[in-house]
Amino acid sequence: MALLFFAAAGTARAGAYLSPWLPLYQGVDYATGTNTPSAAGMPDLQVMRCVRVDLTDPDVRFITTPRIPNFVLDKSEVAGTTVSNFLMKNQVQIAINANYFYQGSDPFGSPDYNLPQGTPFVVSGLLMSQGQVVVPQEGSPNYNTTLVFSSNNVPAVTFTNWPVKGTNGAYTAVTGTYPLLVNGFNVGTNYLNSGQPLSGINPRTAFGISQDNHYLYLMVIDGRQPGYSDGALDWETATWLQMVGAYQGMNMDGGGSSTLVRADTTGLPIPLNKSSAVASDGRERTAGSMFGVYANPVPGFFNNVTANPDDIAATITWTTIVPATTQILFGTNPASLNLSTTVNTTLATNHAVLLTGLAPSTSYYFSAIATIAGNTYTSSNFLFTTTNYVTVNPLFDVTNAWTYTSADLDGVNWTAPGYDDSGWQGAGPGLLWADAYGPGFDPYVTPENTALPLDPNNNGYPYITYYFRTHFNFTNNPSGVALQFAAYVDDGGVFYLNGQEIYRLRMPSDPILNSTLAATYNPCVSPNGDEGDATCADEFLVSGTVMTNLVSGDNVMAVEVHNFNALSHGVTFGAQVMFTEPNVPAPALSMAPTGNTATLSWTRGGFLLQQAPALTAPWTNSPGPVVASPYSVGLTNSSLFFRLAR
């Protein structure tokens, strides 16, 4: 078969078209491509998306999926996630799927891609992240084409990393299946008659490197969507790599995992391709290996936008390319920034605004507004989250004792503080558990302190619902207090405080009855591969209006735990509860004299700098006003005192 090679970006040749490169970030460009089937020498309809990364840009950095905390080689190596969540969690600007992965012990098996995020997976081939080996190069030699980068992003491709070669000098590494381009030659035809499903017409992810090592190419070809994009063969993928400028290229995990996303200015993901998994299932796949790119924004009218939030205030700073007015629009809804600061009409290129009256632990969207000669400019939306200064104190541990019953309590006000639970069983310490297979079935469910009764009318399986109550004494001021839970629940539960519902965990929104099943099962997966048991804690915070019934003195917490189905073998409950209370520290202000000036600095945002000629004299705002650190002032023979204020 004759392969047709194509011309520069932005031109159409032989039925294939590659768009011009569009700058997304500093050192990161984006292009798309499509073809007319057969006319381009490629028989399949294809839509290609590609990101080009300048490896010489000093601000470009890479990250890959880290190790899972309970790492077990060839069993539990990484925690599954979607590409979009990987982007948000690591605050990268570009994210794409990378290595193949699998679940269990079969490297050629197909994992359940709809498993909850956090599910342990095994990664095929070498994976390194920021100097740390996440997974060594081991396992099947079928996954042996490795791309490594040094700490300053110098790339090297090893097409046959089998037997295993060393990782000296490697800082970041990902591994694909086989090469597609070797020294500029399209070797994808090698797999035309391989019979392997990987070499069929599939959605594709491919990585490439330019001949001069200047550029990294991250490519996705959509597929399995008739009329939009069918997918690509190996040699077709290699042809697209040649079109964008690659000299070396490798095939990565593809199919429904092929996903390429970018971040907007608030850190939320924007899909760059149309994933076949989203098209068929309505959601991104949970995958095992990701590659992320950090990059700075492309310079524009607004630059260096920075938010420095505190608990109830925030300082926003930015620059403009020409002198302009200063104003911020902000609010908790990105579609409606309904709050604004007063316009400062003094024209400047360096801007600073103090936002006050904010709520702690709250996310705010904001944009900058500038006016010059009657023309108004508005920046993109940005995002910050205020802090919440609190102290964390223990309330009771996971081994806390609870009274319990498996009786049907429909219509009974069993959560009320005055309810008489003397007829219940216990009190027994947590974890409280019931298992049709007996104690220790999953050794990672621990400590199994109190056995709950099984249902004799259900062949010795657990009851659908168990009820628990405990008393605790609270001696602090309840104002502003929140409860922080680490709960071991198999499978769903409803939590009550002094008779008021405060939290639902994996339960439907309908009224809860004794026969109500949990909406889903516990997502935990043990290191030994068992699923659905309470081997990890569900962590959540209860605060705000639902906490208004916490009282100084005796309190009652009640919990009902529901199984996922009537023949689920186990039920588990136990909870560690901490409480947080407000504790706002004073800001730190420092001064460093240099020659005839002194520079004042502070790290927290949301404060005004004030000054006075004496400690007992009236305090005034420093001229500006000054809301951003650092600030320099000339030294004179007279005294001048400074402080931070709101």
Image (cartoon, grey):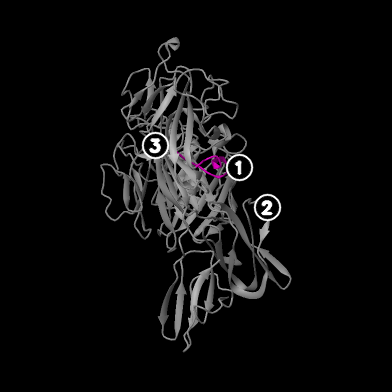
- Where is residue 550? Give x, y as percent: 52, 40
Considering the numbered disc 1 on the image, is that residue within a helix, a strand or a loop?
A: loop
- Where is residue 642? Give x, y as percent: 49, 76
Q: Would you name the residue on which mark 1 appears?
A: 36
Q: CA distance from mark 2 to mark 1?
A: 43 Å
Mark 3 Cα-neighbour bin, 10 Å: few <14, some 14–19, many ≥20? many
Q: Earlier in the sequence, mark 1 or mark 3?
A: 1
Q: CA distance from mark 3 to mark 2?
A: 42 Å
Give yes or no for residue 540 being in the magenta stretch: yes
Q: Is residue 434 above or below residue 136?
A: above
Q: Is residue 472 above or below residue 14?
A: above
Give yes or no for residue 446 being in the magenta stretch: no
Badge 1 amino acid: Thr
Residue stretch rendered in magenta on the structure: 539-551
Q: Is residue 429 above or below residue 600?
A: above
Q: Earlier in the sequence, mark 2 or mark 1?
A: 1
Q: Would you name the residue on which mark 3 appears?
A: 101
Considering the numbered disc 2 on the image, is that residue within a helix, a strand or a loop?
A: loop
Badge 3 amino acid: Phe
Q: Residue at x 42, y 18 (%)?
A: 462
Residue 522 visible in rendering: no
Q: Residue at x 66, y 61 (%)?
A: 340
Mark toward the viewer: 2 or 1: 2
